[in-house]
Amino acid sequence: MEELIAKRYATALSSASKDINAVSNVLNVLTEAISNDEVMTAMTSPIVSAEKKTEMILAALGDEADAELTNFIKILGENKRLDLIPAIAKVLNAELQKASNKYEGVVKSGKKLGKEELAKLEETLATYTGSKIKLKQEKSDLDGLRVSVDDLGIEVNFSKQRVKEQLIDFIKKSL
């Protein structure tokens, strides 16, 4: 439900704004600020009025903020939807990635991949999807490799244990 509402606000903001990249960057910074525990407590507190919450966000933007963005934040405050800022930022980021055909993904593995291996994996995914994909590596306890690009709906797993099990099943079936 939250994502549907966020999409409507993101669509309205992208149609009203001249520089959607700058607006998206500002919303990403606001998302990080809102994720702070103290700020989140104030934003969800029923004791703090909607006007005070709006003033907090506008103060974080500063005096030189874009007029459309300032009005947008005021509208969110009036409708008690300031908690949607992270979801709106996520929707805008997805739209920008789709427009530029550049996506970000995550590689999880037990050992660190070299730059050449990572580049080759990015190149293979680019060939498969027709999009430019930038992969970021995260270390995990996985005995294999997992690649995921959420915005494209791609998830690939290579597990040594799974290959071993499939090989044993194949041998059993062929006997």
Image (cartoon, rainbow, N blue to C red):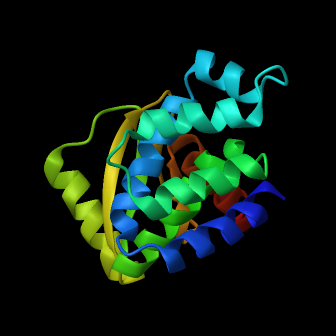
Q: Quadrant of the N terminus?
A: bottom right
Q: Please tell me which residue lies in front, 91 or 26.
A: 26
Q: Is residue 53 visible?
A: yes
Q: How far across and how far down the image is residue 146, in percent?
A: 48, 49
Residue at position x 78%, y 55% from top?
A: 2
Residue at position x 41%, y 32% from top?
A: 110
Q: Please tell me which residue lies in front, 80 or 137.
A: 80
Quick check: 48 left or right of 108?
right
Residue at position x 38%, y 58% from top?
A: 66
Quick check: 48 left or right of 90?
right
Residue 104 drawn above or below residue 101: above
Where is residue 99, by image quadrant? Answer: bottom left
Q: How far across and how far down the image is residue 53, in percent?
A: 66, 32
Q: How far across and how far down the image is residue 39, in percent?
A: 60, 22
Residue 49 drawn above or below residue 14: above
Most extreme residue toward the left is: 116
Residue 156 drawn above or below residue 73: below
Q: How far across and how far down the image is residue 55, in percent?
A: 58, 34
Q: Is residue 165 visible?
A: no
